[in-house]
Image: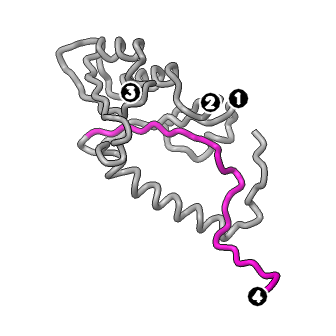
């Protein structure tokens, strides 16, 4: 039909906005509260509304983790695992091979002081090797995408063309 267009799906105009979520869990399924890194210059309480308990909210210009933010996360990890400065009781921390983790001397020294053995997986393999990507994030992403699609279909007036940060 001429002049008619079929819209496949309503999507948000906020494409390209990065928000990083750093999650950690052990083999028993216990979670450490996440850290969310928003692409913002200043933090507002709006982004904290409805978040999981004890979540840490941080800003960065890119929305990605930095060397300093990874060090903050490592301190958060130490606090919630109740580690003490000791090399006796070691704990294994499996990470992706991102340079913010592997080339961060301050984080490596802090981990060594608390008996944390950091194992970095090879680049471009985490989607197959990293336990959380296979068991947790894949179903989370599927369910989140489904919920977002449903919400956008029911609230088409909420779709923005431009984001104001």
Q: Which mark is residue 77?
A: 3
**First-in-chain label (3 vs 2):** 2
Which residues are the magenta region? 1-26
- Looking at the image, is mark 4 or mark 3 nearer the viewer? 4
> How far apart are labels 1 and 2 at the CA level?
7 Å
**First-in-chain label (1 vs 2):** 1
Q: Residue at x 52, y 29 (%)?
A: 65
Q: Give above or below for 76 relative to 159.
A: above
The answer to whether marks 4 and 1 mark residues whose Cβ atoms lie closer than 8 Å is: no
- Looking at the image, is mark 3 or mark 2 nearer the viewer? 2
- Looking at the image, is mark 2 or mark 4 nearer the viewer? 4
Q: Quadrant of residue 138?
A: bottom left
Q: Residue at x 33, y 42 (%)?
A: 125
> How far apart are labels 4 and 1 at the CA level?
49 Å
Q: Label 1 belongs to which residue?
A: 42
- Which quadrant: the C terminus? top right
Q: Label 4 belongs to which residue?
A: 1
**First-in-chain label (2 vs 4):** 4
Q: Is residue 64 magenta?
A: no
> How far apart are labels 3 and 2 at the CA level?
19 Å
> How far apart are labels 2 and 4 at the CA level?
48 Å
- Looking at the image, is mark 4 or mark 1 nearer the viewer? 4
**First-in-chain label (1 vs 3):** 1
Question: Of helix, strand and loop, which one carries label 2?
Answer: strand
């Amino acid at each position: 039909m001429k002049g008619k267009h079929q819209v496949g799906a309503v999507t948000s105009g906020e494409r390209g906005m990065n928000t990083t979520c750093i999650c950690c869990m052990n083999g028993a399924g216990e979670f450490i509260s996440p850290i969310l890194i928003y692409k913002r210059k200043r933090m507002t309480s709006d982004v904290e509304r409805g978040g999981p308990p004890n979540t840490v909210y941080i800003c960065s210009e890119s929305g990605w983790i930095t060397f300093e933010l990874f060090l903050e996360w490592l301190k958060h990890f130490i606090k919630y695992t109740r580690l003490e400065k000791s090399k006796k009781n070691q704990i294994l921390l499996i990470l992706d091979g991102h340079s913010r983790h592997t080339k961060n001397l301050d984080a490596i020294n802090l981990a060594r002081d608390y008996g944390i053995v950091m194992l970095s997986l090879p680049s471009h393999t985490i989607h197959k090797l990293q336990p959380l990507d296979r068991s947790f994030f894949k179903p989370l992403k599927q369910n989140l995408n489904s919920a977002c699609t449903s919400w956008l279909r029911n609230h088409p007036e909420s779709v923005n063309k431009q984001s104001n940060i």
